Amino acid sequence: MSSLGRKALLLMIPLNLLLTVWVWIGRLVFGVFGWFGLVLAPVALVLLVALLVTTILAFTQEGRPRALTGFQAGAQVVTWLGMLVFGTFLPDFGDTEDSHISLLTQVFGHDDAMLSLSYTIATVAALVTVVAYVVLLVSLTAARRKATAAVPA
């Protein structure tokens, strides 16, 4: 049992909840909030259900004390980091011409390069999150299959 695996397992519930909210409305902390608040509401719900699946799989793994493997913990941490970056850098827009803003435009001034960079960072973070989540899901499912196959009939 790795220390990271145990810590990651114990942090799954609070961080999954917190980061789901962060993906949904975290940009509000930086003064960036607009229509994506509504657009991302169903996405946040799907994300919450997806994270619930991996959390249940993780907490019902074989072995005592319960812990994620190092590989699973790494995939979970990368998923969390991707969610954090996505929620931080995703630009948002409103009803007026000058309401298309992001964290980078708030810090470095409003221009198209900062908006483009923000979208690029958010897109890469979303892709990293999805890939890391799929890796975690496959790893947890494979561990469950291995444990089920090892039990004699």
Image (cartoon, helix red, strand yellow):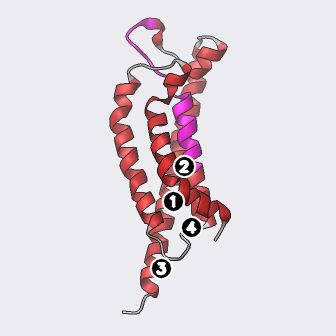
**What segment carries the magenta color?**
78-97
Query: How many neighbours does mark 4 have within 10 angstroms: few (below 14), some (14-19), or many (20 or more)?
Result: many
Name the residue beneath numbered marker 3.
Answer: 146
Q: Position of residue 91 (x, y in %)?
A: 50, 23
Q: Is residue 142 left or right of residue 74?
A: left
Q: Could you tell me how far apart the alpha carbons at marks 2 and 1 are, in whole angstroms?
A: 9 Å
Name the residue beneath numbered marker 2.
Answer: 79
Q: Are marks 2 and 1 in contact (CB under 8 Å)?
A: yes
Badge number at residue 38: none
Answer whether residue 151 is visible to the viewer in this image.
yes
Q: Amino acid at mark 1?
A: Leu
**Dominant secondary-structure state across the stretch colored magenta:** helix
Q: Position of residue 112 (x, y in %)?
A: 57, 15
Q: Amino acid at mark 3?
A: Lys
Q: Is residue 109 left or right of residue 119?
A: right
Name the residue beneath numbered marker 4.
Answer: 67
Residue extending farthest to the top is 97
Asked if residue 67 is among those painted magenta in the image, a careful observer would answer: no
- Looking at the rendered structure, the secondary structure element under dot 1 is helix
Badge number at residue 136: 1
